Image: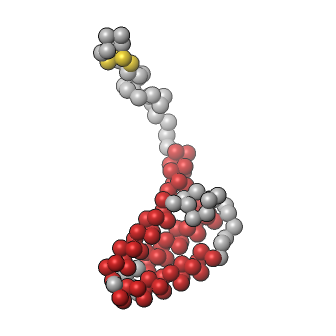
């Protein structure tokens, strides 16, 4: 297996899992088919220019993580951020900046007060 095949397959798997498991959308069979063809293409491109093909494969993987493939389905990064916000514990400062017990305000003299 070439150096780019795993990266390209991970890109396709991430897209499919984000769409079907996390968003509940129906399976789009064009994604695994296109991923397989893209893996073959990258494997062939790697024979001509190995370092460039590997850099391009990682670039496409990272791009897939942060952009939306389908406008109505959030990107994997957006899905992860929504999950993180949903499961994170509430902070003790009630969401206000400054000291844990309250906020820092600027008095009339311009000094910081707690």
At 42% across and 88% down in the image, what residue appears? 44
Q: Residue furthest right?
A: 26
- Going 47% across and 31% down the picture, which residue do you hit? 95
Point out the image quarter for the N terminus.
bottom left
Q: Residue at x 50, y 81 (%)?
A: 38
- The quadrant of the picture occupied by the C terminus is top left
- Above-or-below relation of 102 to 45: above
Q: Is residue 87 visible?
A: no
User: Of 63 and 96, which appears nearest the observer?
Assistant: 63
Q: Quadrant of residue 53?
A: bottom left
| Residue 14 spot, x, y in % from top left | 52, 68
Q: Is residue 39 among what the camera can see? A: yes
Q: Position of residue 100 (x, y in %)?
A: 39, 26
Q: Nearest the camera: 81 or 39? A: 39
Question: Residue 99: x and y, percent?
Answer: 37, 25
**Is 16 situated left or right of 59 in this image?**
right
Residue found at x 61% / y 63%: 70
Name which quarter of the figure residue 45 lies in. Answer: bottom left
88 displayed left or right of 55: right
Asked where in the image residue 6 lies, by quadrant, the reply is bottom left
Examine the rendered structure and indicate whether residue 43 appears above or below residue 94.
Answer: below
Q: How many marks?
A: 0
Q: Where is 86 relative to 19, above or below?
A: above
Q: Going by the image, does 62 lie left or right of 31?
A: left
x, y (%) of residue 39?
48, 82
């Amino acid at each position: 297996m070439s150096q780019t095949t795993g990266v390209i397959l991970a890109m396709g798997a991430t897209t499919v899992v984000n769409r079907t498991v996390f968003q509940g959308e129906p399976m789009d069979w064009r994604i695994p088919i296109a991923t397989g063809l893209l893996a073959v293409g990258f494997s062939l491109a790697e024979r001509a220019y190995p370092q460039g093909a590997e850099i391009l494969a990682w670039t496409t993987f990272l791009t897939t993580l942060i952009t939306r493939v389908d406008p109505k389905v959030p990107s994997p990064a957006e899905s992860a951020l929504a999950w993180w916000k949903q499961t994170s514990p509430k902070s003790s400062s009630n969401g206000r900046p400054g000291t844990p017990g309250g906020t820092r305000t600027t008095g009339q003299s311009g000094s910081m007060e707690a």
